[in-house]
């Protein structure tokens, strides 16, 4: 009997049958060519996710499916199927209630390459005004291979929160950073294959919005305007009873731009013409280009939080105020800004060396 070929096995492993028949059929559906390819239904996409996450698909089949979907263009039903399976697995592990009073930050896992990320210092600051905030990620992913949340968090001297203790930690500290390795380990086992492909795939779109602790409010970054309304409708379907906002931040993140207004979609019915924008504070300097290391990005975050004269402190405080508004703590940026303490004396920073 031939062994089941999982993600961790080489493409050249023996498989006389020529691949798993279920995956072969799904690949044929999306990969026939420009005139014959069809979108997968949500059920078909979920079956593909099961085959991939359970290690039943070969690495070649997984790569073929992901690239065929990328070439064809990912459909709403394909995203939905992968969301459904991933969320089902997270639901079986999460320590959180069906809806947790918190804000989930949906930033791209492939991180920042051009400028430092602002979500971590903004989240720490906003947590001092009563908002619970959930950050999550996983490092070294395509397409950018940038510096992400988990790398910066640990380089700041902070510990990734164990998933089973995350709700208690959130209640105590106000902000947590989770690793996908704990709440969806099957997904993280795809990293070597994704690194070999080197491209953005359907997985990039889905993973940032998985909301592992079922936070009531979600703020998700996006890059392509033509995807925003589709993703918004889908997230509202996947997360009924939750409030979802999309923001066209720096490098597809939730970060406010330093040099121009940042577009935000507060409801799925908004268009680029009807959605509003958030302007950076007057006099904001352009963000610096940093070395592509977690240490340099972590030092930037700590400097912003500790130095009253830091040129980007007003921008980070504006982001913190925006988080407070999205999380439902305050109704206006002005009120939220006035509620933020001038200095960021967060308990999670107390034991860090100066």
Image (cartoon, rainbow, N blue to C red):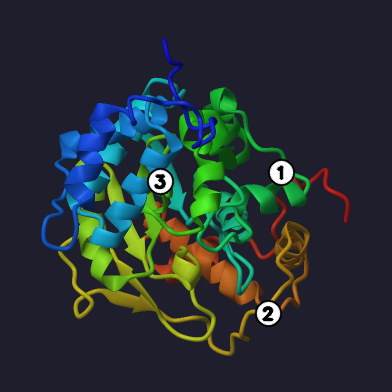
Select label 3 or label 2 by which is in front.
3
Q: Are marks 3 and 2 in contact (CB under 8 Å)?
A: no
Q: Name the residue under label 2.
A: 288
Give percent across and percent down for residue 12. Answer: 51, 35
Which quadrant is the C terminus positioned in? bottom right
First in sequence: mark 1 or mark 3?
A: 3
Query: Mark 3 vs mark 2: which is more N-terminal?
Result: 3
Q: How crowded is mark 1: few (under 14 residues within 10 Å), some or many (20 or more)?
A: some
Residue occupying the far bottom of the picture: 283
Q: Name the residue under label 1.
A: 348
Residue occupying image coordinates x 11% and y 61%: 35
Name the mark on residue 320. Answer: none
Q: Can residue 135 be seen in this view?
A: no
Q: In front here: 77 or 33? A: 33
Q: How far apart are marks 3 and 2 (CA)?
A: 36 Å
Q: Nearer the viewer, mark 1 or mark 2?
A: 2
Is any part of residue 177 visible from this angle?
Answer: yes
Q: Circle 3 sits in a helix, a strand or a loop, which is it? A: helix
Residue extending farthest to the front is 16
Quarter holding residue 181: top right
């Amino acid at each position: 009997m031939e062994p089941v070929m999982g993600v961790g096995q080489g493409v050249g492993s023996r498989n006389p049958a020529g691949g798993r028949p279920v995956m072969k059929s799904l690949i044929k559906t999306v990969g026939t060519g420009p005139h014959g390819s069809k979108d997968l239904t949500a059920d078909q996409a979920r079956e593909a996710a099961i085959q991939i996450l359970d290690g039943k698909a070969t690495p070649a089949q997984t790569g073929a499916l992901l690239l065929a979907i990328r070439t064809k263009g990912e459909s709403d039903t394909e995203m939905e199927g992968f969301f459904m399976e991933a969320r089902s697995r997270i639901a079986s592990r999460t320590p959180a209630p069906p809806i947790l009073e918190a804000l989930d930050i949906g930033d791209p896992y492939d991180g920042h390459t051009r400028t430092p990320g602002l979500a971590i210092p903004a989240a720490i600051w906003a947590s001092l005004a009563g908002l619970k905030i959930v950050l999550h990620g996983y490092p070294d992913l395509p397409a950018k291979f940038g510096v992400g949340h988990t790398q910066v968090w640990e380089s700041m001297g902070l510990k990734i929160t164990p998933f089973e203790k995350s709700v208690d930690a959130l209640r105590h500290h106000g902000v947590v950073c989770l690793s996908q390795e704990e709440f969806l380990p099957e997904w993280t086992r795809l990293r070597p294959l994704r690194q070999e492909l080197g491209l953005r795939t359907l997985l990039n779109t889905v993973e940032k919005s998985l909301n592992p602790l079922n936070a009531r409010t979600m703020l998700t970054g996006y890059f392509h305007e033509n995807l925003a309304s589709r993703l918004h409708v889908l997230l509202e379907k996947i997360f009924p009873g939750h409030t979802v906002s999309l923001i066209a931040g720096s490098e597809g993140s939730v970060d406010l731009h330093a040099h121009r207004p940042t577009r935000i979609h507060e409801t799925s019915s908004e268009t680029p013409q009807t959605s509003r924008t958030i302007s950076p504070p007057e006099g904001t300097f352009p963000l610096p280009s940093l070395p592509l290391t977690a240490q340099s990005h972590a030092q930037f975050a700590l400097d912003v939080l500790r130095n009253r004269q830091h040129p980007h402190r007003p921008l980070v405080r504006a982001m913190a105020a925006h988080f407070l508004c999205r999380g439902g703590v305050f109704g206006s940026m002005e009120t939220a800004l006035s509620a933020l303490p001038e200095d960021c004396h967060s308990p999670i920073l107390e034991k860090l060396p100066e």
